[in-house]
Amino acid sequence: MTQVREFVEEPRPFTEADYVRLRERYTAQLLSIDGVRAVYEYGNTHYHPGISDIDLIAVTEERLSRRAARELTIYPLDDPAAVVMRGWANPCSVELFQQPLLAPYWEGSLRHRGGAVIAQTPLAPEVAAYAHLITVVDRCYQAVIGLMQRFVSHRWYVVATLSHLRAISHNVQVYERFTGTPLSGASKLGEAVADLRRTWFTSGPQRYQRMVTLVSEGLRVGQRLSHGLEQVLTARGWTRPWIPPEVTLRTDDGWTMAFGGRTADWAGLAPTSHGHRPALPLPPLALRQLYFIYRHAPDLLGPSLVRQLRTHAVHDAAWEFQGRYRAVLLDYLSLQQQRQQYLRRHRLPGRPCPGAWWHRLERRAVPTVQRAQRWLQARWAERSRFVKWPRRSAPQPALRG
């Protein structure tokens, strides 16, 4: 039986000039806020117009006024290209920005866009290697879960799917640099994904089938990458042999994640009938990392996830990471806790460990906030069309007899 797929949130045909105009306008807006010291951009700045997004960092003082904090969550929605922003700038204090362990994936991709130039303390080469491996574990499963959700759904979010495919390719590159060995099939996937993103608007209707094929191949490469990560951690003595329990966690938006069971073929997941979602299988390494965070930094997890993990408490300490990898991971989580305190202090939206996979197990409030912000700005624009509003007459004083 042929599956019927609905492709939504497709790329829009913007130009690189649209990206530059939007970036410069948003940068100037951020620098006008009291307490913002600098604006940086991270990620690949060789845009694929309509597909790539713009990722900005607003580097601020440690203490902000309430007004400044509110203004950080406003971006130029009236710009035709505003949809490529995917959200407001990533707020970060100067003290945290100077610690590259906070976000190792920023290394080598930061571009100064305005304000003061803020130097970062370089990481030792050994620590940098561990840090990049930690972020690969975070972001590999983030992309894999996204591809699994597309593969078993009838509705495909095109821009998000292309982003997950690119993330798989990037994580493979970091893994290959760390291990010095190529991952089977990864180079062909990376070339095919880059070509699809580059030629999306000229490929014709067959681009959708190409994307579906690449999602299947991306899941196979992601499964090999996950297996390779577990082998590296075990071979270097950073993990001990561990038989994981069978744990099922249910997300707030109706997905089920199954850990510890029989290792399934990720690319063999089958689409289901409308309204039914199969359990998505995840490997023991993902559960090991989740237990580690729950034990050492539970405030980085959402309340729903903490409650579920409390019911599945594991008393066997074999899941703990070991050695230097464990020490760097603890330092990494400590910085994420400091960032969480910074966000809460200023009532700023955002998540600790941006891009980490376990965010898919928690309630996602940012899209709702963005929709509300767009609605309010649209209503304000509608009101501003009227030059003068009728004034309500003042109440007349009551007459006394």
Image (cartoon, grey):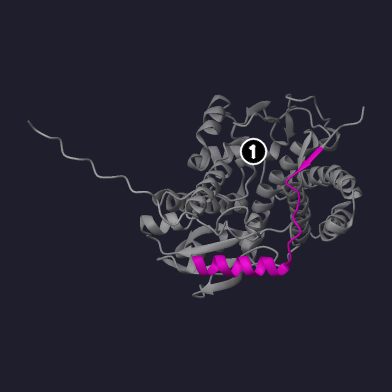
Nearest to the observer: residue 187 or residue 227:
187
390 vs 88, left or right, is left
At 83% across and 59% down in the image, what residue appears? Answer: 194
Looking at the image, is 10 positioned above or below residue 282? below
Q: In which quadrant will I find the C terminus?
A: top left
In-image side of 128 versus 171 (left or right): left
Q: Nearer the viewer, residue 338 or 279?
A: 279
**Residue 239 picture location, percent across and down:** 67, 43
What x and y, as percent, mark residue 288?
64, 38
Whether residue 85 is visible to the viewer of this picture, yes or no, is: yes
Q: Residue 120's x, y, as percent?
A: 54, 70
The reply to whether the magenta stretch includes residue 44 is no
The quadrant in which residue 240 appears is top right
How crowded is the residue under tag 1: few (<14 C-alpha within 10 Å), some, or many (20+)? Answer: some
Residue 14, magenta (yes or no): yes
Quarter holding the N terminus? Answer: top right
Q: Which residue is mark 1?
A: 288
Where does residue 137 sit, x and y in percent of width and height? 68, 48
Callout 1, which amino acid? Arg
Q: Is residue 237 visible?
A: no
Which is nearer the eye, 217 or 370?
A: 370
Magenta region, residue range: 6-29
Secondary structure category for the residue under label 1: helix
Quadrant housing residue 3: top right
Residue at (77, 33) in percent of width and height: 153
* In the image, farthest residue toward the left: 401
Q: Is residue 10 left or right of residue 325?
A: right
